[in-house]
Image (cartoon, grey):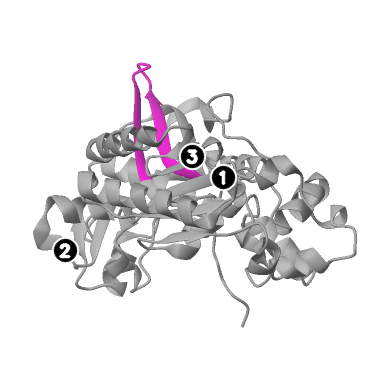
Amino acid sequence: MVGSRAVHRVIFHLDMDAFFASVEQRDNPNLSGRPVIVGAPPDRRGVVCAASYEARKFGVRSAMASRTASRLCPDGVFIRPRMEAYRDESGAIMALLTRFGGAVEQVSVDEAYLDISHRFPGLEPAPIMRLGQDMKELIHSERQLTASIGIGGNKLLAKIASDHGKPDGLFRIGEEEKVAFLRPLAASAIHGVGKVTAEVLTQAGLHTIGDIQDYRGDLRALVGSFASVLKRYAMGEDDRSLEYDGAVKSVSAEETFEHDTDDRRVLVPALLEQSHELAGKLGKERLAARTVQVKVRYSDFTTVTRQTSVEDPIESAQEIYAIACSLLRRGRLVDRPLRLIGLGVSGLGPPSLQLVLPL
């Protein structure tokens, strides 16, 4: 049995459906039902920031090269991102959430947790589900967008529930069913289990959350100090509170060259090393990023930065590097020798969950 504090928490997780693309489809009705790809056009060396569900059916995903996306989805409609519009829309949606009272933790531009435990002294599912439906209907009526809402006794369960119900879903994982519900899900569905940790677990034969629940060996030999947390998460237990500040907001790396240079043989290894350094930091903190920024400084100390955001969080060095290269090319930033080159990621949150059932 878990403690009474965990039992009586009621956490909602709001996740907007294909947010960037949905905003574009709403603002331009001609795009309704069409495979919308937000990002660089396919005739340019850039990447996808987001894709509508119609495009995702073809395998298009965030951080993919636009040319690859075009091959996978020949009828895709490519639209350049309007980040300011998405931020404004995010602000309007978060303002709607405050109408329901309780604490709100905004995780990213299209994602938030709400702790509304004070409204439900008991755990009767009907009124809890009605409130979730009220949230969805308010967002749809006021903003003409759909959202998926997950509900659970903690952040872990609420997040998994919202992913399970996508798109336009409303799903609750009850305390009495959480252990059984989690059993068939892939180990990567657990908060903090990124690609590297998932590979370690797979090599040890731990493919599903159920495998972790049943494991009688020493998890510390596999995942170090994360072992005890991993075991609790596998049982659906999570005592994290909502966060408002003090969390890691961004990570960055940069290099100042001994001699100014525009030589690719120098710049490419520097960017690759920084990408791996950032990916390592993200892995250590068990985070993923939605925004990548490049920074260059020229001989006269003029400093220029460029950034872009993707809808699905990224965590690998390869993805970070690909977006960094796209930013440099698109901004034509290496048009003369550089004194410094830097790379940063922000918009940090948990890695993307993949709810894959075992074959």
Q: Which residue is drawn at 37% across and 43% down?
A: 309
Q: Residue 10 carries which label?
A: 1
In the picture of the structure, the residue carrying the numbered disc 2 is 32
- Mark 1 vs 2: CB contact within 8 A: no
Label 2, label 3: how many angstroms apart (C-alpha)? 30 Å
Q: Which residue is drawn at 53% across and 56% down?
A: 125
Residue 136 vs 335, above or below: the answer is below
Coordinates of residue 140 in the picture (x, y in percent): 25, 51
**Lower position in the chain sequence, tag 1 or tag 3:** 1
Coordinates of residue 189 in the picture (x, y in percent): 60, 60
Q: In this view, does 81 lie to the left or right of 184?
A: left
Select label 1 or label 3 by which is in front: 1
Q: What residue type is labelled 2?
A: Ser
Does the image show residue 332?
Answer: no
Q: Residue 114 carries which label?
A: 3
Q: Is mark 2 on a helix, strand or loop?
A: loop
**Residue bounds of the magenta highlight:** 289-309
